Amino acid sequence: MKTILFLLLITTISCKSQIFPLNTNLDDVPYNGYIKDLDNELDKYVGIWVGNWNGKTLSIEFKKVKDHRNHPQYPYYKDRIFGERKVVSSNGVVEIDRITNFDFDSPEIRGPFRSYSGEEKFLFSPKNMCRKRVSLYIKSFTTTQMTLHFEYEPSYYDADCQHNAYEQQYGDFPVNFPKDIVLTKQ
């Protein structure tokens, strides 16, 4: 009986020791450790955020998920925010709707992350845009409003990209996302 209690105690302690606070350095996380949002810091993002630009309505739904990173040397779990978007034109035509079929395996938006300058940002990888990546910098944030600023991340030129002619003609990719927008939490 003592042996069973001892093994149960050791198992319980070792399971608890695998959970770490959200801002833990990855070097301090053991194999398959879990970086958990213990203080609910990510909850402020969860929900649907809506804003308008050029007559269009942008909705972004953010969800908190337990994300598994399969890093070769040290796989781990981490609570993150995943986001998908919906864009509706001024005449009500749905141009993009990734919210209805939220893709937990490959969401367009992940984060939040800290930039080298210490700013919070989300990474945005728009679908069918030849692996272009964007930083969505959080310029201001309250419980009801968030301002995002769009900046491309450095990327390689893809000679086979179906959008190269568009980019050469208009100087940008047809991402369908504003450069700056104020979103209001619904």
Image: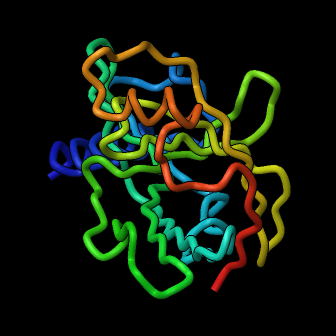
Where's the C terminus, which quadrant? bottom right
Residue 134 to residue 155: above or below: below
Identify which residue, 4 or 81, lies in the foreground: 81
Residue 166 to residue 126: above or below: above
Identify which residue, 113 or 146, lies in the foreground: 146
Residue under the point 77% across and 67% down: 182
Q: Residue furthest front?
A: 169
Q: Which quadrant would residue 121 be assigned to in this image? A: top right
Residue under the point 68% across and 74% down: 52
Image label count: 0
Residue under the point 33% across and 33% down: 69
Residue 111 drawn at (x, y percent): 55, 45
Residue under the point 38% across and 66% down: 96
Question: Is 160 situated left or right of 108 in this image?
Answer: left
Identify which residue, 36 or 100, lies in the foreground: 100
Residue 33 drawn at (x, y percent): 38, 34
Residue 177 drawn at (x, y percent): 57, 55
Question: Is 52 situated left or right of 21 in this image?
Answer: right
Question: Colour scheme used in the picture?
Answer: rainbow
